[in-house]
Image (cartoon, rainbow, N blue to C red):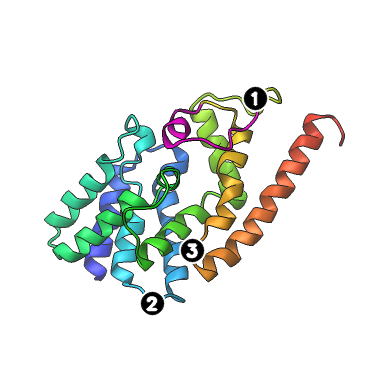
Amino acid sequence: MHTIIESTKGFVKETLKNAEGGHDWFHIERVYNNALLIAKKEDVDVLVVSLAALLHDIADSKFHDGDDSVGPRIAQEFLFKENVSSETIEHVVNIIANMSFNKSLEGALAFTSKELEVVQDADRLDAIGAIGIARCFNYGGFKDRALYNPEIAPNLNMSKEEYKKSTAPTINHFYEKLLLLKDKMNTKTGKQIAQERHHYMEGFLKQFYAEWNGEK
């Protein structure tokens, strides 16, 4: 197990060496560590969780014209070359294909597993709290979006396609995704950590609006 984990880390580091700051190796490493922490309290296949966490953003659809199939395909090809069992490959690829937030906008998922729940929680934890705020504004800057525009209200009923094509100000993303994640956590550990990070984001927004309006 150790060898496949190390070779996967090397592959991911190399593949993502020029990635946008919120979806780079350090994001992967945080999600991997979060996933291992959550997995300690869950009855799961740790190899599947580890590989899925490491490979989950190997080709994020946001950077591939919205194509959801690129990441799972690259992960599958890599794991096949590493002689990972077909059963493990299939499980890992299914997790990668079904764990993103925009997939949840489609309704019921085509695939679920305890391992998917763990990796999904780990990824969602990295989208909230202090790091979530930093990643949110980093990506907004990467896409040249406004910080905030009081005249553009958040869209709380977006379809998957609308979500993927959104060019709304960065603050809107808190209401369209980040503040919703606390209630979408799957595991007990994930819910506990999310609660504190959610509270931190609420405090940030309160301060942001007070400064924006010249109140403090």
Return the mark for residue 152.
1
Crowding near the residue tagged with mark 3, few <14, some 14–19, many ≥20 C-alpha atoms within 10 Å: some
The numbered mark, 3 or 1, whose residue comes first in the sequence reads 1
Q: Which quadrant is the N terminus positioned in?
A: bottom left
Residue 198: x %, y % from top left: 64, 54
Confirm whether the magenta stretch covers residue 211.
Answer: no
Q: Nearer the viewer, residue 13 or 49?
A: 49
Q: Give the label, 2 or 3, closer to the camera.
A: 3
What residue is disc 2 on?
43
State whether residue 18 appears in this view: no
Q: Are marks 2 and 1 in contact (CB under 8 Å)?
A: no
Q: Amino acid at mark 1?
A: Ile
Query: Rounded to the nearest whole Å, what is the CA distance between mark 2 and mark 1?
Result: 44 Å
Numbered range of the magenta stretch = 152-166
Q: Amino acid at mark 2?
A: Asp
Q: Are marks 3 and 1 in contact (CB under 8 Å)?
A: no
Left/right placement of residue 54 relative to residue 159 reads left
